[in-house]
Amino acid sequence: MTSTPKPSETSRFLERLAAIVGPGHLCTDPADLDPWLTDWRGRYKGRALGLARPGSTAEVQALVRACGAAGVPMVPQGGNTGLCGGATPDTSGRALLIQLGRLNRIRSLDAGNHSLIAEAGCTLAQVQEAAQQAGLLFPLSLASEGSCQIGGNLSTNAGGVQVLRYGTTRELVLGIEAVLPNGECWEGLQALRKNNTGYDLRQLLIGAEGTLGIITAAVLRLFPPPSIRVTGWLGVASPAAAVALLNRFQQRFDAHLTAFELVCPLSLALVRRHIGGIPKLPDAPWHVLCELGESDPAADLQARVEAFLAAGCEAGELTGAVLAQSDSQRQGLWRIRETISEAQKQQGPSIKHDLALPISAIAAFLEQVAQPLQQAFPGIRHVAFGHLGDGNLHFNLSMADAAANRALLERQAEANRIVHDLVHALGGSISAEHGLGQLKREEIRRYKSAVEMAAMQAIKNALDPAGLMNPGKVL
């Protein structure tokens, strides 16, 4: 239970916070606060008592202890690029935003152990660059990598485009340092790949969206970088054909296949309209963006892929293929994929779904969901794209007409029920890599068992009995 401090108490509390973080690092001015009170999509708008920017783990501890003593809720925030409102405070104005961008040091890099320690406020691009300077690779790759922060990546168990080869964020973290809701610091920065000494608190905090503690640093796994990358844009007849092609790629190239992305024609059309700069691509009902990597610079991976694709075109398994012939062409193909969300944002609001399905069920989902949606919402459009290689589909709904689209958004719960019920029936999940935040907090209760929900609540109650750590998110 939290209470609103009286004005005099609030002033003294804010003075205490300012003393913790130092001059210039506590923000209470409404104009300065405003950019941090709205999520990236513009869906959620909150209020806050203030925003604190700690510069060390010790300062995070002091902030958490001060908030705990005063009964003030805390909302951890990184780059504010989340898509489910997980880093946006509620409208009460009682919470303190704890923005971690000043915790932005690469503390150490152990090339022999293929690991580095990064603070939570490091951007993903900063970590990638540190690994590259050491001749290594940090494979997590997201469209927002220039602004998203490692703490947020861990808190949402970010996925990205390379999960097929390297796994989600969970597989990329060896250790964590975190401030728990009681203000104690768990120093779990062991750079071990095997550590079987009890409950794995690291994995408990990853994906918890800041509801069980504030991650302040992490040990991240690094890998040898590929010397050769082969990137292709392929045309296929259908999602089923794309899944069949994925299976053939994996049988032929195994772990060399690092990314396999599905793109629908409407996604491509939106990028062409709002972003531009699209090269000549195969004319096809559906599209695939794939990438393969090889560490041996003398390998003939490009020639092998060319022969594989030529055979596929001859057999009618592909409607066309374009392979990047330079790094700039490779980046151009990836730019198409990575700007789909921005193009959708410019087009207007939509009902967004971040779905996980068995790969074998993706084609069935896309086929079966179309009719009930069209019956309920005549003229509805589907923007379907995502990480086919790991079964993560982004499935977004809108109308071409602005007035019709506003009417659709008002019936979001009905649309969600059609989509989510089918996903659940096919053995899937309504959140793959974006988390629950406040967007799906209530929705998840329909699909998780009472046993699972009770276990999650028991963990929350044990670690955060006062309910001050990012309240209203996940649970």
Image (tube, rainbow, N blue to C red):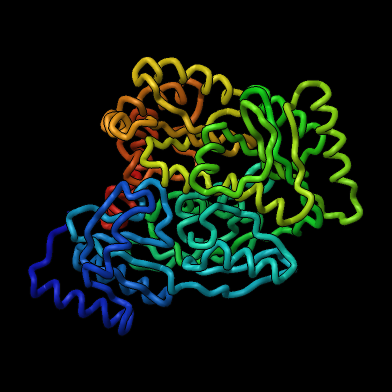
User: Looking at the picture, how far across and down is residue 341, in whole percent?
Assistant: 48, 45
**Position of the C terminus by quadrant:** top left
Quadrant of the rendered structure where residue 296 is?
Answer: bottom right
> Residue visible at 50% across and 72% down?
104
Which quarter of the figure has residue 396? top left
User: Quadrant of the image for the N terminus?
Assistant: bottom left
Q: Is residue 114 left or right of residue 207?
A: right
Q: In front: 181, or 319?
A: 319
* In this view, 444 is above or below 33: above
Note whether 438 is above or below 363 in the view shown.
below
Residue 86 placement (x, y as % from top left): 36, 51
Between 188 and 81, the residue placed more toward the observer is 81
Q: Is residue 207 left or right of residue 125?
A: left
The quadrant in which residue 379 appears is top left
Residue 225 position (above or below residue 121): above
How many discs mark residues in the rendered view? 0
> Which residue is located at x 64 percent, y 67 percent?
129
The residue drawn where x is 60% and y is 58% is: 174
Residue 35 lies left or right of residue 288; in this view the side is left
Q: Position of residue 275 (x, y in %)?
A: 52, 49
Can residue 187 be seen? no
Residue situated in front as seen by the camera: 266 or 35: 266
